[in-house]
């Protein structure tokens, strides 16, 4: 989980409550880096990593079918 939901961060501790749907979604979201300082090398690395992750996910999904 790259970005924990606000209710799990220390600054929001006084208002903390159980939000199971929010926590589940946060665990399933994929965040890709993007900002004006990404180089072509950085972008290539992100794309290659994402491609490999998708291939691994598809292979695992097919093996479970």
Image (tube, rainbow, N blue to C red):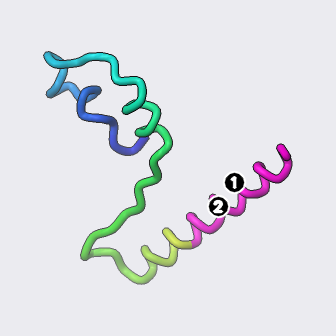
Asked if the residue at tag 2 contacts the one at tag 1, i.e. Cβ–Cβ closer than 8 Å, the answer is: yes
Disc 2 designates what residue?
54
Which residue occupies the foreground of this view, 46 or 64? Answer: 64
Is 56 colored magenta in this rendering? yes
Quadrant of the image occupied by residue 4: top left
The residue carrying pointer 2 sits among few (fewer than 14), some (14 to 19) or many (20 or more) residues within 10 Å by Cα, namely: few
Is 53 colored magenta in this rendering? yes
Q: Eyeballing the image, is 30 above or below 4?
A: below
Residue 10, given in percent of the width and then of the height, sits at: 20, 25
Secondary structure beneath dot 1 equals helix
Disc 1 designates what residue?
57
Picture residue at 42% right of the left edge, 83% below the top: 40
Q: Eyeballing the image, is 38 above or below 49?
A: below
Q: Which residues are magenta?
A: 48-65
Residue 65, given in percent of the width and then of the height, sits at: 85, 46
Q: In screen coordinates, is 41 left or right of 3?
A: right
Residue 18, given in percent of the width and then of the height, sits at: 33, 17
Q: In screen coordinates, is 30 left or right of 9?
A: right
Dominant secondary structure of the residues highlighted in magenta in the image: helix
Quadrant of the image occupied by residue 36: bottom left
Secondary structure beneath dot 2 equals helix
């Amino acid at each position: 989980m790259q970005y924990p939901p606000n209710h799990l961060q220390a600054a929001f501790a006084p208002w903390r409550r159980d939000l199971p749907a929010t926590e589940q979604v946060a665990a399933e979201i994929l965040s890709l880096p993007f900002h004006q300082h990404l180089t072509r090398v950085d972008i290539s690395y992100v794309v290659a990593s994402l491609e490999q992750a998708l291939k691994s996910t598809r292979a695992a999904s097919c093996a479970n079918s």
